[in-house]
Amino acid sequence: MAENFDLLVIGAGPGGYVAAIRAAQLGMKTAVVEREHLGGICLNWGCIPTKALLRSAEIAHYIEHAQAYGIKVEGKVTLDVEAIVKRSRGVANQLSAGVKGLLKKNKVTVLDGSAKLLGGGKVAVTAKDGKVTDAAAKHIIIATGARARVLPGLEPDGKLVWTYKEAMVPTATPKSMLVIGTGAIGVEFACFYKAMGVDVTLVEVVDRILPVEDEEISAFAAKAFTKQGIKIKTGAKVVKLDRHADSVTAHIDVGGKVETVTVDRIISAVGIVANTEGLGLENTKVKLDRGHIVNDGYGRTDEPGVYAIGDVAGAPWLAHKASHEGIICVEKIAGLPHVHTMDKSNIPGCTYSFPQVASVGLTEAKAKAAGHEVKVGRFPFIGNGKAIALGEPEGLVKTVFDAKTGELLGAHMIGAEVTELIQGYTIGKTAELTEAEFMHTVFPHPTLSEMMHEAVLAAYGRAIHY
């Protein structure tokens, strides 16, 4: 006999486990199916462990530059790759155990294995040992996430050509590296390995790095990375790889001219592909669009009682988007009043590079393309007392307002701790504040957040400190 649940979630990543916990809070008998790691890719092989690696690199950077802060460090700074990786994996394991504890606390049943939809609310869960458990639920949420995209000819082999997984657990530091793709993943790994002493080259097929960011921020980032010694090739496409015993030669088409670069290792960071295989979607009316499951904004698919959230349901591919989608989906299922679909223009994006990059809303170019007459404000880190005191004077805060209504259309930041600061603008956009509310908000001094105030003032010709 199949065990019956009110809600069954397939996948225990940041979308799935959050949805399961919220459902349990609302009184539903809930189960979650996970084939590998509680917490999903984000917690185990993405967001969290990469930040632990980057933190180690950041500490090393500060130690190497300690004299600038009046501190003498005797002897050479040594980077212990094994210890750095061990710490990163320990952080991931701790948080994965935390998710397990949260699910237990909320009385969510965890089914280990891979789930397949059989239709009619029935699901078969196959464990690693081949044992099959039958389950049934009135509501089923697909939250299976995504995996690294593989391009023909650039297939990862685990030794010479890495995905994010191999890049997170190196047994030794290569001397040279080529990173293909300059989205958040590619840029973060480039910065980490450069800080570890690796000769790094970034390759991007379009004409600028961090292509989803505002052009001004992308240019600032390119300048900062180049200053660190990272080589950047834009408008470039890797067309062929020659794999040797312990190195790789990449043939790169740059504006019609093919160049060759030989490196120890390559990281392929060219996007992701939704995990829809083996789910039994053929037994349902669920539709796919460019590989992602189609939903209606509340997670509902064309199959009654089947929902999809997170990366498997399309862009933006962000953990916090997945978690919020899970909340919306479950609260709609529960019949709570005033449940709204997500405004994706209010979802912030963060890149934990050196320097950090963060943004929310429209870029200046997209705002103009959408027909807005804009007012743009800029404030540099060099004009902020706290940034100078921290020894972090390089950065920029940029705001884009609708000139007619005062609506904040977008905010774009690069510099120290901007991934923490961006939420202030995100709250403002969500609350539909205008420039007047931002201007009349009191920001504490001395803080980096004062630059957010000044960037608003600057859009209206009222900046004080620059």
Image (cartoon, rainbow, N blue to C red):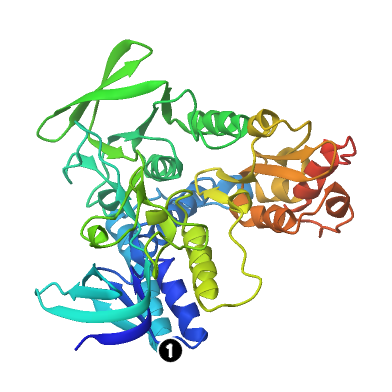
User: Looking at the image, how many numbered discs can be counted on the residues?
Assistant: 1
337 is higher (above) or lower (below) than 431: below
At label 1, the amino acid type is Lys
What residue sits 63% from the left and 33% below the top? 366
Location of residue 428 by image quarter: bottom right
Q: Which residue is mark 1?
A: 105
Quadrant of res 177: top left
Give above or below for 239 relative to 414: above
Q: Quadrant of the N terminus?
A: bottom left
Position of the C terminus, as image quadrant, is: top right
Left or right placement of residue 50 versus residue 423 in this view: left
- Along the line of sight, which residue is nearer the eye, 444 or 316? 316
Residue 257 shows up from this direction: yes
Q: Is residue 296 left or right of residue 203?
A: right
What residue lies at 88% left-to-right and 50% top-to-bottom?
436
Left or right: 195 as drawn, with respect to 407:
left
- For image coordinates 26% across by 75% down, the residue present is 122
Question: As rendered, which of 11 and 48 lies closer to the eye?
Answer: 11
- Tell me which residue sits at (74%, 51%) in the image: 386
Q: Secondary structure at mark 1?
A: helix
- The crowding category of the residue bearing disc 1, from other C-alpha atoms within 10 Å (few below 14, some 14 to 19, many at least 20), is few
Percent x, y of residue 113: 21, 73
Residue 293: x %, y % from top left: 37, 53
